[in-house]
Amino acid sequence: HRATVPAIAAHVDAAAARFAWRPDTPIDAVPELSASVDWLGGGGQGTGQGIRLTLDDALGAAAARAGRVGDEAFRVTVSADGVEIRGASPLGVFRGATVLRQLRDPDAPAQAEVLLPAGVWEGAPAYGWRGVMLDVARHFRPVDDVRRLIDLLALHHLNILQLHLTDDQGWRFEVPGYPRLTEVSARREATQRGHGPEATVEPGVHEGFYTTDELRDLVRYAAERGVTLVPEVELPGHIQAALAAYPELGNTDVGVPASGPWERFGVNARTLAPTEASLAFGRAAIDALCDVFDAEWIGIGGDEVPVTEWAQSEAAAERMRALGLATPHDVQPWFTAHFVAHVRARGRTALAWDEVLEGEVPEGVRILAWRGPVAMREALSRGIPVVACPDLEVYLDYPQSESPEEPIRVGPPLPLARAYSLRIEDRAVGGQANVWSEHLPSRDRVDFAMFPRLAAIAERLWEGGEPRPFADFMRRLPTHLRRLAAAGVRYRPLDGPSPDQRRPGVPGKPLTVEAREAIVAGLVERLLDGSAARARAARK
């Protein structure tokens, strides 16, 4: 009963009589709280003591005064006479209902009577953005898998699921006026196997996309569980899948047109050409997302955009001269400004990766800072809302140990203890884990990469501040692993991957933390140079 994850402040009376929760236990709630009733399994028809759900504005006010997110505040009170869940809002009640679910014996059958300890559990999160980014572009995940992940996020009090819907390797949503995006861009004929110089490309069709109706249903499903779906389209780079369908949008006077989505992984030189047609395409994609998703934020990508083609293209050079752009490095900020303006015209906020900080960032942008503290602090110094997702702590495709049996060794090791060390900079709006799926081709592989590290990250995003002792988390984790097992999650065991979770023969590219830090230092050089230039200009 003390094993809640994330950790929730509790006052338990071990000597008091416990509450018997049965399948027919009645749940008393107003219709506004029906999502929480459903989350608890629905109200039974039994008589006697039950579970009461109620709203209490005072909880939110007290949480806000303490610097927490007020509308998610809750208090759960359990006694032999019944259970009361009070919340500052329907969302707060839902968080309390989630805690109550965690008080059940994880191994008890769903229809069994369980005894809950008497006590009080209460809290509110430190951050309003507690998220996960799932890459469904490299390896598509069916709708049922996304629903299941939404349930798992709700179990961990996470409230954002960012869907990375497009990349070089696949396009996964419909855009009116561009039918070939789902006919051509959502299917590739082969896929890279492994990472590094020994990686190969193996034939085999990989395909899939979400219909507009499927996405609308996912938005509804997530909202009922306190999760906001945030869509992302990659612009103007990571775009080969789209260019395979509409090559005229690319820099057609350099290179060979793409014949299909990219079958390899990494940074691709292909980009949109700086044309009106490309802007119209980007606006159409953004419109399609705004018409389906109700999130405040619309992701527009912006990461890892090489200037290679713009530097080589005569057509791009002519366009740059007409636009007054001095160098190829000015093209991405030009794209960003247009797409941000369009997102704002739709009443939303653009979400972009921290590479856009290398140019002027227009108002109406929230930054995903993945390149460590340098990018995070640069965004904060410029007054830009920022979400922390530093790769060394939250990139869950990184291996979980240095063992050669750890699949697949891409990037430096990110063990559970390092994930739990996540520290969010003051003034950030929150953080998220990023699950890139190049080497996660199945649901089980996604489970293995995410859990239990996501449980550690979820706790850090709920609590904020400095991490509590890691031993405290580890004391509670075994009970939580039983919850995950009961939910069918194929998590990585604490002592290493099980034999069927290893991937012998799949090449990787081991990397130390120090080597990765050096790489990231190189990646932020332009950002630091730009920051220094702005500082000099401000002093003049």
Image (cartoon, helix red, strand yellow):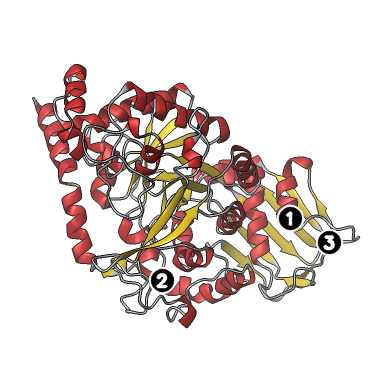
| Sequence-first tag of 1 and 3 | 3
Amino acid identity at mark 3: Thr
In this rendering, position of residue 261 left or right of residue 274: right
User: Amino acid type of disc 1?
Assistant: Glu
For disc 2, the marked residue is 470
Residue at mark 1: 84
- Which residue occupies 75% across, 68% down? 110
Place of residue 7 in the rendered image (x, y in percent of width and height, measured from the top left) = 53, 63
Q: In this orientation, which residue lies closer to the viewer: 443 or 538? A: 443
Mark number, residue 438: none
Residue 244 in view here: yes
Q: Is residue 179 left or right of residue 272?
A: right
Inspect the image, locate mark 2, and give the three-letter code of the amino acid beneath it: Phe
Residue 59 sits in quarter: top right
For mark 3, what is the residue?
Answer: 25
- Label 2: few (<14), some or many (≥20) within 10 Å? some
Q: Secondary structure at mark 2?
A: helix
Front residue of 154 and 470: 154
Q: Is residue 435 visible?
A: no
Cβ atoms at labels 2 and 1 below 8 Å apart: no
Q: Are marks 1 and 3 in contact (CB under 8 Å)?
A: no
- Residue 118, by quadrant, is bottom right
